[in-house]
Image (cartoon, rainbow, N blue to C red):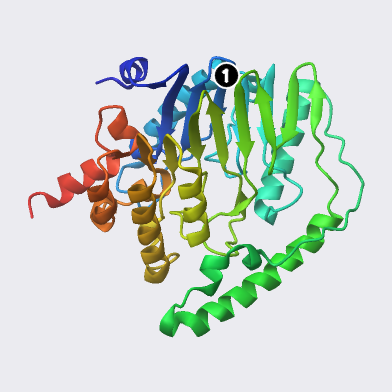
Amino acid sequence: MALNMVFKSRKIKLGSLEIIPVWSDSMGAKSFSVFINTGDLKIIIDPGASIMQSSFPLSDEEKFSYLERANRFLSRFIGKSDLIIITHYHYDHFYHRDLSVYRGKILLAKDPNRYINESQRDRALEFFSSLAIALMKRGLDLLDRKESFRVTDPLSELTIASTRDFGDYNSRRKELLEKGKRWFFSLVQKWSNWKKIPEVEHEDIMVKFIDNKSLRFGDTVIRFYKPLFHGIEFSRLGWVVPVIIEKEGIKILYTSDINGPIIEDYAEWIIREDPDVLFLDGPATYMIPYMMNMINFRRAKSNLINIVTRVKSKYIFLDHHVTRDLRYRARLKEVFSKRKQVLSFAEFHGMKAIAQKLYEERYSKR
């Protein structure tokens, strides 16, 4: 079935809400984008796309073809949207090709001035500077203001993860956490000294930073959670801001990139929220054993099993990092066996995940 035909027919309707999983990695390009029409307004979350990793077994031509398709769909859904949400500044989460698509939109974005690593800060600065030139015809006026940040050790908020016994791995884990803590507090000093990227109110664009805030549009409430680690504790990939959208007693939870979740406290938070529709990015199993060790993989798998067996969600989407791995269904077979509602974006739209197709083609004859 042609992709454009799929998108005309595949959507979730819950009350007055319409939800369309626009694009994710299971469809051939890195992305994790969702469109939601609440009746009060139309929202797109994280409308970005990047080419699949070099190890993914498609030709460069095929990878670029999927990337172009992804960008066409994202551009189309941005055009339909009143409000654009950016949960962090990785290129597969925000649209940076043609900034004119942001004209006339409300942009709710993660705060680029704190709880952000250096590379995401650089991307955010480039993005907002280019946005100002494209839509306001002037440079971005950074705020020359220093602030003192009072922060606590992030582990103090991770009471489950920080007290868990990892057996023989405890000493190595303690060493890594201490190193991560030093990295974190060195970043805090940089947040205090950076010039500040400002929020913007202009006739052609409104930009608001949303970490740990709640907004209402008519009967639609959008809650933004506090910044969470992009993966493990003190992940050098930085932080992301999950999104909760509620109306008429219906709750949608978009986790953004928490890689599983790996961290047990994040899983318990998801279970407490108990959404009707849940978007999980899944662990980056394609990086085993190089960037993800088996201990953290087992943590993520255990957390996923805990989530899918305890939440009431009518739909659970498990995609993004995890579907970059041809073996993802085998690695997480215990998760998929618990709930038939656990789907990739591709499966929801009536297709096999690209990784699953490639796996079957490669291994079915063995």
The C terminus: image quadrant: bottom left
66 relative to 1, above or below: below
Q: Say which of 100 and 153 sits in front.
A: 153
Left or right? Give the position of 229 relative to 260: right
At x 69% / y 55%, what residue is drawn? 118
Residue at the disc numbered 1? 81
How many numbered marks appear?
A: 1
Is residue 49 visible in the rendered image? The answer is no
Q: In which quarter of the image is residue 167?
A: bottom left
Residue 239 in percent (x, y) is at 62, 52
Q: In the image as oriented, which residue stretches furthest toward the left? A: 365
Is residue 230 visible in the rendered image? The answer is yes
Q: Quadrant of residue 88?
A: top right
Q: Say which of 284 and 318 sits in front.
A: 318
185 relative to 308, above or below: below
Q: Say which of 14 and 355 sits in front.
A: 14
Left or right? Give the position of 245 relative to 189: left
